[in-house]
Amino acid sequence: MKQYLKTQQNPFGQMIGFSVDQPPCQPVEQNLTGQYVKLIHIAGPISDQAASEIWQAVATEPNAGCWTYLPYPAPPSKEQLRETLDNTFGFREGAHFLIEVEGQVQGWIALLHPRLEYGAIEIGNVYYSHKMKQSRASTETIFLLLQQCFKHGFRRIEWKCDDCNAPSKAAALRFGFQYEGLFRQDRITKGRNRNTAWFSMLDEEWPALMQSYQQWLKPENFNAQGLQKQRLTEFFES
């Protein structure tokens, strides 16, 4: 039986969840470095160089549709983008990271809505520019955040997206999250109704998933052009 399904009986004969001694988790607020990517924690104003690099990625973005499901429109200028990043998009809690690939900032991502006392947090506000989509860097970004969150004692990591956002839902499953359900009329985004699809990953699932990520990320799993030989989901299934 999966750990999260375990129950016990209280003195009144009622079934209750298993006992948990959960110390408050520590937030993940440091730079993270992998083989193919570096995540730079935004702890204050970003540098001029970082601002120029991420603006260059945004300004040359060929797919205007990449902004459809984010809660904000495409940044209109470098100055506006920099201000938005400095203010972490108005999120009051959590941690935002710039994504640096091959020495150049090419995207951003965040850990949102931390519930430190319960050991739960969400990966969200993801912008992968055209420079890094469908790359080793995009997958390793998720791996580094998952790894650090579970190291910091989190029990549950969430992934939420607009139910109309088919690529995001597919990504959640590819990254090893499990679909939990649909929150109907969850919010209004850009004047539109949003039904939110919820996914999660639990600490008991991570050891096996971590091994699969590590196998997938090995250099020998990629050819000279950087294309994968085996998909991540194939390692999940093995």
Image (cartoon, rainbow, N blue to C red):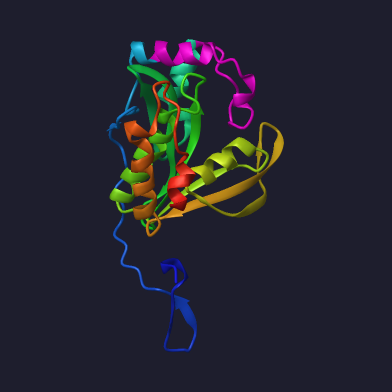
Q: Is residue 37 magenta?
A: no
Q: Nearer the viewer, residue 89 or 196?
A: 196
Q: As drawn, is 156 to the left or to the right of 28?
A: right
Q: Position of residue 30 (x, y in %)?
A: 28, 35
Point 34% across, 11% down: residue? 49
Q: Nearer the viewer, residue 179 or 93?
A: 179
The correct choice, above or below, for 193 with respect to 35 in the image is below
Point 47% across, 70% down: residue? 5
Point 64% across, 52% down: residue? 182
Identify the image quadrant of residue 223.
Answer: top left
Q: Nearer the viewer, residue 56 or 12?
A: 56
Quadrant, the N terminus = bottom left
- As drawn, the residue found furthest toward the bottom would be 12
Q: Position of residue 159 (x, y in %)?
A: 51, 45
Q: Is residue 72 magenta?
A: yes
Q: Nearer the viewer, residue 220 or 74?
A: 220
- Which contiguous range is marked in magenta? 51-77
Q: As drawn, is 79 to the left or to the right of 212?
A: right
The correct choice, above or below, for 1 with respect to 151 in the image is below
Q: Position of residue 10 (x, y in %)?
A: 43, 84
Q: Position of residue 76 (x, y in %)?
A: 56, 13
The correct choice, above or below, for 93 with respect to 77 in the image is below
